[in-house]
C-alpha cells in the first residue's frame, strides 16, 4: 500500500547507514519489524508470575526420554 509520510530525513539517513540499508523503505520496514518484536516481548513480561513452575522438573532427564517415531 502506498503511504506518504513526513519523516525526519536526518534520522532516516542515520538509521540507513547504521543498518546498512540501501533504501528508506528498507529502513522503515526494519524499524517496524523491530517495533513489533519489542512490543511482543514486552507482552511476555506480563506473564511473569502467572505460570506455575515445578521446581522438581528435571529438564535434562526429560531430553533423554525415548521418543516414539511419528506414524507415516
Image (cartoon, rainbow, N blue to C red):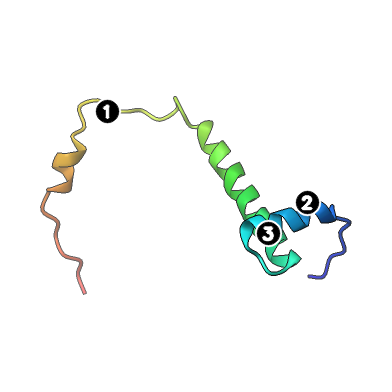
Residue 33's tag is: none
Pointers 1 and 3 in contact (C-beta within 8 Å): no
Q: Residues within 10 Å of mark 1 (few under 14, many from 20)?
A: few
State which quarter of the image contains the N terminus.
Answer: bottom right
- Residue 1 is left or right of residue 27, and the answer is right
State which quarter of the image contains the C terminus.
Answer: bottom left
- Residue 57 is left or right of residue 5, and the answer is left
Mark sitting earlier along the chain (1/2) = 2
Q: Circle 3 is placed at which residue position? A: 17
**Disc 1 from disc 3: Cα separation:** 47 Å
Q: Circle 1 is placed at which residue position? A: 54
| Residue that appears at 12% across and 48% down | 64
Q: Residues within 10 Å of mark 3 (few under 14, many from 20)?
A: few
Q: Position of residue 43 (x, y in %)?
A: 56, 38
Q: Closer to the camera, 58 or 4?
A: 4
Q: Residues within 10 Å of mark 2 (few under 14, many from 20)?
A: few
Residue 71 image-quadrant placement: bottom left
Q: Circle 2 is placed at which residue position? A: 11
Secondary element under disc 2, as helix, strand or loop, is: helix
Mark sitting earlier along the chain (3/2) = 2
Q: Nearer the viewer, mark 3 or mark 2?
A: 3
Q: Position of residue 8 (x, y in %)?
A: 84, 52
Q: Position of residue 12 (x, y in %)?
A: 77, 56
Q: Nearer the viewer, mark 1 or mark 3?
A: 3
Mark sitting earlier along the chain (1/3) = 3
| Residue that appears at 17% across and 40% down | 60
**Location of residue 21 with respect to 43 vertically, above or below:** below
Amino acid at each position: 500500500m502506498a503511504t506518504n509520510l513526513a519523516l525526519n530525513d536526518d534520522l532516516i539517513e542515520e538509521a540507513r547507514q547504521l543498518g546498512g540499508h540501501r533504501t528508506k523503505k528498507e529502513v522503515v520496514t526494519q524499524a517496524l519489524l523491530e517495533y513489533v518484536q519489542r512490543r511482543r516481548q514486552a507482552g511476555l513480561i506480563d506473564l511473569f508470575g502467572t505460570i506455575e513452575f515445578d521446581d522438581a522438573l528435571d529438564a535434562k532427564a526429560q531430553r533423554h526420554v525415548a521418543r516414539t517415531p511419528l506414524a507415516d
